[in-house]
Image (tube, coloured by chain):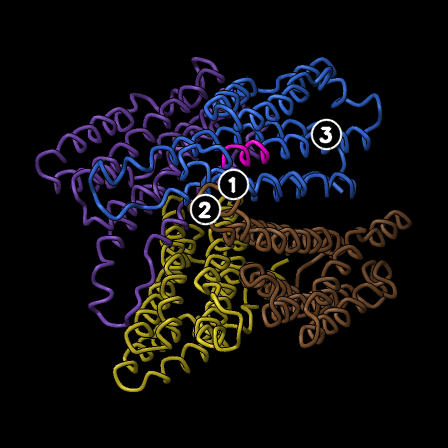
Chain colours: A yellow, B purple, C blue, D brown
Amino acid sequence: MGTNRLEAFSDGVIAIIITIMVLEMKVPHGSTFADLAPLLPVFLSYVLSFVYVGIYWTNHHHMLHAARGVTAAILWANLHLLFWLSLFPFATGWMGENHFAALPSAIYGGVLLAAAIAYWILQQAIIAAEGPDCLLRRAVGSDWKGKLSPVLYACAIASTFFVTWIAQAIFIAVAVLWLVPDRRIERTLQHET
Amino acid sequence: MGTNRLEAFSDGVIAIIITIMVLEMKVPHGSTFADLAPLLPVFLSYVLSFVYVGIYWTNHHHMLHAARGVTAAILWANLHLLFWLSLFPFATGWMGENHFAALPSAIYGGVLLAAAIAYWILQQAIIAAEGPDCLLRRAVGSDWKGKLSPVLYACAIASTFFVTWIAQAIFIAVAVLWLVPDRRIERTLQHET
Amino acid sequence: MGTNRLEAFSDGVIAIIITIMVLEMKVPHGSTFADLAPLLPVFLSYVLSFVYVGIYWTNHHHMLHAARGVTAAILWANLHLLFWLSLFPFATGWMGENHFAALPSAIYGGVLLAAAIAYWILQQAIIAAEGPDCLLRRAVGSDWKGKLSPVLYACAIASTFFVTWIAQAIFIAVAVLWLVPDRRIERTLQHET
Amino acid sequence: MGTNRLEAFSDGVIAIIITIMVLEMKVPHGSTFADLAPLLPVFLSYVLSFVYVGIYWTNHHHMLHAARGVTAAILWANLHLLFWLSLFPFATGWMGENHFAALPSAIYGGVLLAAAIAYWILQQAIIAAEGPDCLLRRAVGSDWKGKLSPVLYACAIASTFFVTWIAQAIFIAVAVLWLVPDRRIERTLQHET
């Protein structure tokens, strides 16, 4: 089985997740700046999550490019990743509506952490299917970003018990870290061909 | 007519169903654990339904792989299946919000039962189009899972009149039963080629 | 430009329309039959609209199969059709929530009428692009269904001023009329090749 | 990397945006003309935004046709455009619900302005990747529409401080301007081949 339908389905789910998040920005009833102002934290958390989902989409895109076939393990590892991504709209809306309060920020970090682990599992499932010397494994290399991110998310969750804005700073820092797109696979692919 | 556009449309509908379900988890107004706690049953029923929709997607995926063309009967049998799947968000949300009460659990079982029957009808429509000796028929074999599931769903519905948690246990058991992906078609396909 | 991306985009929009309609069936707060009963008309109008959108999807599917290229006129005639289809969830929800009252039924008929006209315009745009002797024109033939439906919708709208259930009967009758899928194009295609 | 998956993902997001906007037209509770009347401005703003999203989709379609590969810059310029388009449902709903009041109209103009700039950035990213003598650059030519639109949007935003209906008139005028589809790329493509 090829990766086409898996990509198409994942694209569909991610496209819906990224768009549904905006529905948490409820249209206010009045038409003044005072009506719009309370939406600012919701908007900011939407921007943050949009960037995160965008990062997942682009990296997912690259990773599946390195896979040649789809096993049952890959199929379910992918659904597992989509499950955690599907919780982004809820976590984003809750954090935004409560102006980045401690518990919602911790939950948001928890969803990010779970998605990062799910991504790593999917990566391992592809490597397991492709063999120990496969393209993806060499492309990923030391995978320092993939290893560092969960640690940072855990720090962010812990920080919400003390100073909440540290968590937000970490979320932004990790997003910036990943915004530099994952060129390793592209580069390795070019070396091969 | 090929199966491509049928698959693409089904993928789209299933991707939306799986994502829309999460909208039933309404963002709470407060930011404490006490605000989050009432969402736990909604979350659990979301996890259950996510797994079910995932199972339908993967098996649908495999089944259409065994079809070479699309007849009007297949087209409408597929839409019929999508209709029942589209009721998952409603049934999931209602069951979750009412903490797995009797009637919502019975309705949830009813939607599962109807979807299982619709899946069987689609399977028969493909076999009818492909001929009595087709790949799908041999791949499906005795189809004990497909025959056992509706019986179990009916038991679950009946159990809601007495002890509700039995219904939940059956829903989980059937999901686990199917989580072992349908390798019959893959295996038969490999024997052929 | 090929028809691929037009089909994919239309599939996406139609898949979302068909799924979003179910969101009008709001999860009730109680868990008894008395809580579920008021949803029956909403459910029935959902079934009716699901069938209509399904009919549009299958016929759209067949029609685009007969087109070889996409002109600007086809692109916008298609978007025009999608616009009217996008009003289905609203019209369906309003009619269902008001138990098939006169005005909502008339508006529902109006949306059906507009969609039928938009479908006809799209058909003419394709025929204009393909030439007077094209496959689609011969396949469509006298197009009695396409000509009769708008007349019946207009009758249904008129009937809402007198006896509302006549409108519902007409809506169901036209759906049944079209449920027999449009085999003309398939047949003509087979004669050609 | 080809443009296929980028197109598919963009199509998915745009299809959802165009359909989700209709959800801002909340089903009224009563069933009389008096219940429907307040929805008229919401409906009109929906029509306007539907046309705008349609214009973006068709032009996006043409533009990506002129691109042969996808770089990281194109990927993120595209996500950036989708971000602003994803704010259309919010801006549309707010403007419609407040009967085209000053501030919501200004915000709507701001979203249009940001989307226009994002579109221009994406266009530059493709031209940068394709080289200074590429097809897209010659096709775009002087790009007077692309340069005039942001200026007009800025005028519309400014006008909301004085006379609000001028902003609406400008929004409609720019939409009409673009409704004439972008045939430059088609024409240049034909000259080449």
> How far separated are the C-alphas under marks 3 and 1?
21 Å
Q: Do the residues labelled 2 and 1 touch (CB within 8 Å)?
A: yes
Q: Most extreme residue toward the right, as rendered?
A: D191
The spot of residue B37 in percent (x, y) is 21, 63
Q: Earlier in the sequence, mark 3 or mark 1?
A: 1
- The answer to whether residue C110 is magenta is yes
The magenta span reads C104-111
Which residue is disc 3 drawn over? C123
Badge 1: residue crowd in 10 Å (few <14, some 14–19, many ≥20): many
> For the point 72% across and 42% down, which residue is it?
C75
Which residue is disc 2 drawn over? B16
The spot of residue B48 in percent (x, y) is 27, 46
Out of B72 and A75, give the one closest to the viewer.
B72
In the image: residue A160, left or right of residue C117? left
| Helix, strand or loop status at disc 1 | helix
Which residue is disc 1 drawn over? C15
The spot of residue B141 in percent (x, y) is 33, 22
Give the quadrant of the C terminus of chain A. Answer: bottom right
- Residue D76 visible at all: no
| Helix, strand or loop status at disc 3 | helix
